[in-house]
Image (tube, rainbow, N blue to C red):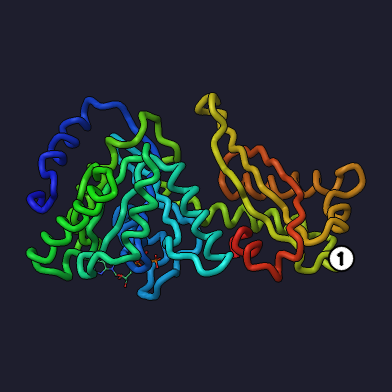
């Protein structure tokens, strides 16, 4: 099977390095036209169903992370919505989200389905990628089970040429089939050495932080709504911005830092949430922190901010930002 790789020797080299190399951890994202197979590949790598897959384009609305735990590396996969030619403001905003993600990750995997001719949509994406100079880029030919070897060879050549045309070289070009689990491990082998040296960023066994983030946000929203349901019927949304273990804590005294924003619709509602001298917000924090600690089984430092997102329920951009 290794013979299908464009760089077959890299697998052995990576395996060999596993014993001696320092541990690595970092972020990768898969980009590509809608339906290219990004979510399915994420799931195959993680070995569990964490991203939403469907045969309808544009189902991935959230940045869903899958986490691959290996002895030599921890690979955190960020699954972005597809980049496309923007026709609306919302479309432009989605593209901004994608570009921001690209600039932050350690590796970008460009996914191109083996059974589709390389088209203008793909070129649009790769052109954008060419502008992100410092991030290593891997071309992944997906769905190889759908084509014969001649078609696959042509696709490998086409994607390689496209890189050349745009003035950069793919670090690797890898054909995979997520559905038949062909070369999926090899892909992880090739990505791992491109990640920065780092201890694991997530506890072993975590496959995604998405459900936890959502549950934590729900617990905060619940506490924030308590006693004010009549005044703020549906006006509260909570977004957990960050959830990270505090650095430099001894192993037996961990602390999880959680930063969350409580969004309301109008400035006049701020007072209701915050309360006299901030007492209500403090109570919301204390109460929800207890529930969060019970849920996650670890001490938590909860940092809550109240923000006004004007008329968020009627504004598609705000809805998107708030995770709807
Ligand atoms: N035969 C075959 N089909 C695949 C493979 N990978 C994905 N598919 C199918 O292709 C379709 C799209 O896959 P997704 O993983 O949802 O694609 P995506 O790129 O995440 O799509 P968006 O979220 O719209 O960007 C689904 O019907 C998958 O079952 C593969 O390796 N082989």
Between residues 63 and 252, which one lies in front from this camera angle? 63
Q: Is residue 48 visible?
A: no
Residue occupying the point 55% across, 68% down: 88
Query: Which x, y percent locates residue 184?
Result: 23, 53
Residue occupying the point 86% across, 44% down: 278
Between residues 318 and 285, which one lies in front from this camera angle? 318
Q: Quadrant of residue 33?
A: bottom left
Q: Quadrant of residue 18?
A: top left
Q: Quadrant of residue 107?
A: top left
Between residues 216 and 303, which one lies in front from this camera angle? 303
- Tell me: 293 left or right of 153: right
Q: Is residue 193 visible?
A: yes
Q: Is residue 254 above or below residue 152?
A: above
- Tell me: 77 left or right of 219: left
Q: Secondary structure at mark 1?
A: loop
Residues packed near mark 1 inside 10 Å, few (<14), some (14 to 19) or many (20 plus): few
Residue receiving disc 1: 231
Residue occupying the point 40% across, 72% down: 57
Find the residue positioned furthest to the right.
276
- Tell me: 290 left or right of 165: right
Residue occupying the point 24% across, 61% down: 142
Query: Which x, y percent locates residue 266?
Result: 82, 60
Query: Which x, y percent locates residue 16?
Result: 15, 32
- Tell me: 92 left or right of 156: right
Asked whether mark 1 and ligand 1 are closer than 8 Å, the reply comes as: no
């Amino acid at each position: 099977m290794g013979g299908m790789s464009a760089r077959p020797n890299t697998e052995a080299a990576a395996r060999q390095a596993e014993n001696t190399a320092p541990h690595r951890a970092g972020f990768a994202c898969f980009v590509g036209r809608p339906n290219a197979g990004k979510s399915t590949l994420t799931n195959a790598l993680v070995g569990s169903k964490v991203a939403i897959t469907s045969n309808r384009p544009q189902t991935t609305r959230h940045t869903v992370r899958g986490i691959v735990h290996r002895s030599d590396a921890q690979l955190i996969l960020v699954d972005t919505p597809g980049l496309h030619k923007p026709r609306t403001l919302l479309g432009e905003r989605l593209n901004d989200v994608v570009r921001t993600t690209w600039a932050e990750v350690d590796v970008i995997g460009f996914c191109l389905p083996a059974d589709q001719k390389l088209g203008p949509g793909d070129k649009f994406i790769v052109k954008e990628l060419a502008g992100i100079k410092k991030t290593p880029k891997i071309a992944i030919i997906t769905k190889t089970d759908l084509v014969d070897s001649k078609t696959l060879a042509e696709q490998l050549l086409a994607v390689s040429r496209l890189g050349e045309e745009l003035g950069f070289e793919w670090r690797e070009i890898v054909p995979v089939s997520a559905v038949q689990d062909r070369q999926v491990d090899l892909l992880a082998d090739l990505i791992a050495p491109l990640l920065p040296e780092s201890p694991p960023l997530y506890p072993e066994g975590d496959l995604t932080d998405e459900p936890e983030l959502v549950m934590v946000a729900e617990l905060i929203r619940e506490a924030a709504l308590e006693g004010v349901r009549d005044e703020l019927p549906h006006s509260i949304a909570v977004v957990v911005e960050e959830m990270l273990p505090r650095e430099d804590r001894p192993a037996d005294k961990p602390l999880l830092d959680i930063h969350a924003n409580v969004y309301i619709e109008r400035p006049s509602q701020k007072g209701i949430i915050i309360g006299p001298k901030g007492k209500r917000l403090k109570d919301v924090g204390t109460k929800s922190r207890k529930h969060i600690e019970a849920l996650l089984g670890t001490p938590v430092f909860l940092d809550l901010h109240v923000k006004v997102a004007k008329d968020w329920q009627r504004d598609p951009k705000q809805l998107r930002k708030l995770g709807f």
